[in-house]
Image (cartoon, rainbow, N blue to C red):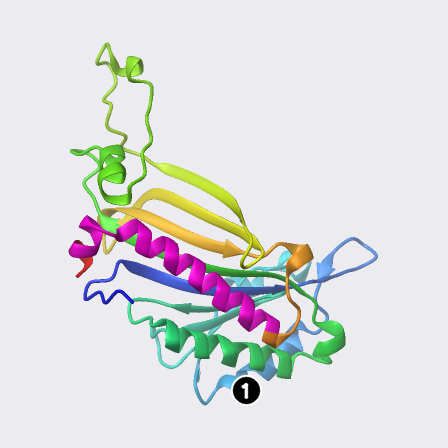
């Protein structure tokens, strides 16, 4: 276990999606959704009493599928938080994240959803799971070469054809970056997605990197116990990649 006093985490997200029902008009809706929101609030209000209705709650039901509309927090602007929309529920945490606590909150979220969804055993068809980590390290894109930084700090080498810059009309330092990779994973069954992009961390330019484990429909578990197993395996995979990426210079920087 790597102990970091200055962890690069921006946000950790667990997401569960369930299948929506298609109407005769071809519209995908959840007929239990409005009832579900009230039931969930009653269930979580002792731990997450601060309720927020987002502007997206005014989107017509016909186009609101998988759009977050409501939030539940302990206090205003406090993390972690639960979010819900038609066919989607998430748990989000930030800098104070610890996996041992986040895992327990995922377990609580699953119990809440399966206990409050009407006849969940028959009606709640889990369609997708996702565990996502967004990390960042500050970087001056205008005066430094991000590709060299990736090579020296992330052990990740990307080479552009240098003849492109031979006439010096184009600066060879990239000022924008958005690299995406996707790999099949065996444990858990799904996809491991990796992204490097330019972004912001507390108003400073930064390299954002995301590690995302995502289930695929045909292998998505549909009960609480199997979902917990999938999530633990997803965490083990993201942790392994994180530790391998930061080993060396970054690990010292984050200490």
Task: State left or right for residue 186 relative to residue 8.
Answer: right
Residue in the picture at 53% in, 82% down: 41
| Residue at the far bottom in the pictured view | 46
Residue at coordinates 52% horizontally, 60% vertically from top-left? 130
Quarter in which the C terminus is drawn:
bottom left
Which residue in the structure is indicated by mark 1? 43
- Considering the whole magenta stretch, tell me its main secondary structure: helix
In the rendered image, residue 189, in percent from the top left (x then y), is placed at: 58, 56
The stretch in magenta equals 226-252
Q: Give whichever of 217, 199 is nearer the camera.
A: 217
Q: Is residue 95 left or right of residue 180?
A: left
Q: Position of residue 150 (x, y in %)?
A: 27, 39
- Can residue 51 be seen by looking at this rendering? no
Which corner quadrant holds the N terminus? bottom left
Residue 168: quadrant of the picture: top left
Magenta span includes 251: yes
Q: Residue at x 50, y 84 (%)?
A: 44
State left or right for residue 246 relative to residue 222. Answer: left
Mark 1 residue element: helix
As displayed, is residue 210 above or below residue 35? above
Q: Residue at x 38, y 81 (%)?
A: 74
Q: Position of residue 208 (x, y in %)?
A: 32, 48
Q: Residues within 10 Å of mark 1 (few under 14, many from 20)?
A: some
Asked if the magenta segment contains residue 212, the reply would be no
Q: Is residue 134 above or below residue 197?
A: below
Residue 6, horizontal then vertical, whole percent: 20, 63
Q: Name above or below for residue 174 compared with residue 46.
A: above
**Residue 165 visible in this rendered orientation of the protein:** yes
């Amino acid at each position: 276990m790597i102990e970091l006093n200055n962890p690069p985490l921006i946000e950790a997200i667990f997401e569960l999606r369930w299948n929506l029902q298609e109407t005769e008009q071809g519209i995908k809706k959840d007929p239990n959704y409005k009832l579900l929101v009230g039931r969930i609030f009653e269930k979580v209000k002792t731990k997450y009493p601060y309720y927020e209705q987002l502007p997206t709650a005014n989107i017509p039901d016909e186009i609101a599928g998988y759009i977050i509309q409501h939030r539940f927090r302990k206090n205003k602007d406090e993390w972690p938080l639960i979010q819900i929309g038609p066919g989607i529920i998430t748990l989000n945490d930030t800098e104070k994240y610890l996996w041992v606590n986040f895992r327990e909150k995922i377990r609580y979220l699953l119990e809440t959803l399966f206990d409050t969804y009407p006849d969940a055993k028959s009606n709640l068809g889990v369609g997708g799971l996702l565990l996502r980590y967004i990390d960042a390290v500050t970087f001056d894109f205008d005066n430094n070469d991000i590709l060299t930084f990736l090579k020296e700090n992330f052990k990740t080498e990307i080479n552009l054809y240098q003849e492109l810059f031979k006439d010096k009309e184009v600066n060879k330092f990239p000022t924008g970056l958005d690299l995406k990779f996707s790999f099949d994973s065996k444990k858990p069954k799904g996809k491991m997605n990796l992204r490097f992009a330019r972004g912001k961390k507390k108003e400073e330019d930064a390299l954002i990197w995301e590690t995302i484990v995502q289930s695929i429909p045909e292998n998505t578990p549909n009960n609480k116990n199997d979902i917990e197993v999938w999530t633990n395996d997803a965490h083990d995979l993201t942790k392994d990649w994180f530790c391998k990426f930061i080993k060396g210079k970054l690990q010292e920087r984050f200490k």
